[in-house]
Amino acid sequence: MRQSHQLPLLGLLLFSLIPRQLCEICEVSKNNYADLNPLINTMINSKYTKGIQAANVLLSLRLGGILNQCQEQQLIQQVKLTVYYKDSTLTSGQLALAILALGACKMPDETSIRYPKLVKKLRNKFKAEIKNMGKHNGNPLTNYYQLSLDVLALCLFRGKFSITKVAKIFEPENKNFYFKGQFSVDTGAMAVLALTCVKNITNGKKKTDMENLNNINNHIKSLIEKILSQKKENGLLGNIYSTGEAMQALFVSSDYYNESKWDCQQTLDTVIMEIHKGAFRMPTAAAQILPALMGKTYLNVNKDSPCVYGPGDFNISTVEPITVTPPLSPSQIQVNYSVVIIKETHSTTVSVANGSVFLDVMEAAQEKNATLFSFTVEERSWGPYITSVQGLTANNNNRTFWELLNNGQPLDQGVGSYIVHEGDNLEVRWSTY
Ligand code: CBY
């Protein structure tokens, strides 16, 4: 009699011991895959996927299972060329991203990629990052977003790293999680993915492992809280460009926050709306948002699982998705432009074609006065990045950079994508982050 009473209780107990479903994922349903077409078009048809951008795109499209084998081959070729010929100039995070993209899944006849060699190179680049932190006041060669990519790739591809060191570096109060005092949602999200991978491969048998695991769990919890504290009224996490990776971080850590804290569907709806408004015209922007929309995360990277090929549910067209310029506007517009170095300001007004971007304004100003408005620019995965103005060069060792602003407000796009408007007060300001 007593035993029969205990049985349901035992069942309940067992049920509550089964870990909650590890991932709470909301994704675009197959019926609505057409909403994703602008992103896929941008990635596949872009003439601008150069160098490491191809790695972002390859990783994203492979996780989504969207490419056919021919498209896949072309992208792989580009990534391989970048890795083998630009090897010494690649930053740690760029190499990590290339490894994640090449090893996202297993092709039917893949033999030529020597992962152990690539992973060893990554390990050396990661070590150089840490060494730089020791020499330069805790500042890595690049940034914590890239260090997170490094740890993620080392973890997924069985590279060596010290878990104790990782637990120490990714302490959530570390200044490298913040730019100008603001928590960087992109950085925090990538760190959560890396730490989750490390957590999953650590078994906690030794005492030090137990301690590390405990620290890592606390870090994940705190980073997730910080990400959720950056949730906007419309559901975006940070801004539109950090939301995709923040969603991935939230997918893999549903045990660390209460369901009521995040309405995934609301975030999804806002992102879909932004796709149609043309927010993701840069291949990298499209690449970073797509996996989350298809319910995938970078933790799905697995070099031993067979690749999935499309296009199954997609109807990829070659039509460019968005045109923005309104028809009845003047063909030339006037904008103000200033270079600000501490208390010294140099301003000018330039005339540029309607539809021009920030970079066009800088070029026009430079043409007017090369001494005051000269600058240098470097191609990064999000497009052009300003490295120096008037010969004054940004430097990660002292956290300096050239900040872009309009009407005194920092921009959330780079010089190659921000479209200027009549009367804008554009500014490049010598700043520290
Ligand atoms: N990727 C990286 O290494 C970049 C990591 C990242 C966190 C990145 C954003 C996020 C991402 N998803 O890739 C990042 N930016 C960093 C680390 C930085 C710093 C770069 C220096 C360093 N320590 O590595 C720094 C200086 C703080 C920075 N970003 C500056 C800027 C401004 C660039 C101005 C210039 N000189 O050209 C700018 C324009 C902000 C401003 N108002 O001045 C800026 N970043 C922006 C807007 C962005 C977003 C780009 C969005 C877009 N549509 O173009 C961003 C996605 C990104 C790229 N930065 Co930073 C953040 C966001 O808005 N969500 C790894 C590599 C392998 O690809």
Image (cartoon, rainbow, N blue to C red):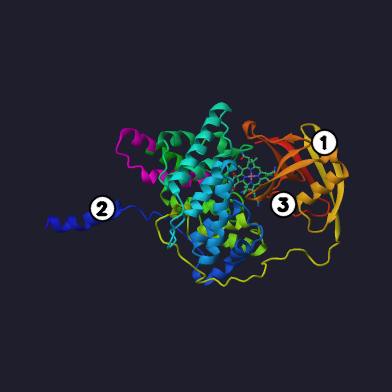
Whereabouts is ligand 1, in terms of quadrant?
top right
Give the residues in magenta: 188-212
The answer to which of marks 3 and 1 sits earlier in the sequence is 1
Which residue position is annotated with label 2? Answer: 13
Residue kind at label 3, given as amino acid type: Gly
Assess whether residue 63 is covered by the magenta stretch.
no
Real-space Cα separation, disc 1 to disc 2, in angstroms: 69 Å
Mark 1 vs mark 2: in front? 1
Image coordinates of residue 26 in percent, x first then y, are 48, 61
Going from the N terminus, do you reach mark 1 or mark 2 first? 2
Q: Nearer the viewer, residue 357 or 159?
A: 159
Compared with 223, 284 (above or below) is below
Q: Position of residue 410 (x, y in %)?
A: 70, 44
Q: Which mark is residue 416?
A: 3
Question: What type of secondary structure mainly makes up the magenta span?
Answer: helix
User: Which is nearer the N-term, disc 3 or disc 2?
Assistant: 2
Q: Quadrant of the C terminus?
A: top right
Which disc number belongs to residue 345?
1
Tell whether circle 3 marks a residue whose Cβ is less than 8 angstroms from ligand 1.
yes
Regarding mark 3 in the picture, which secondary structure is present there?
loop
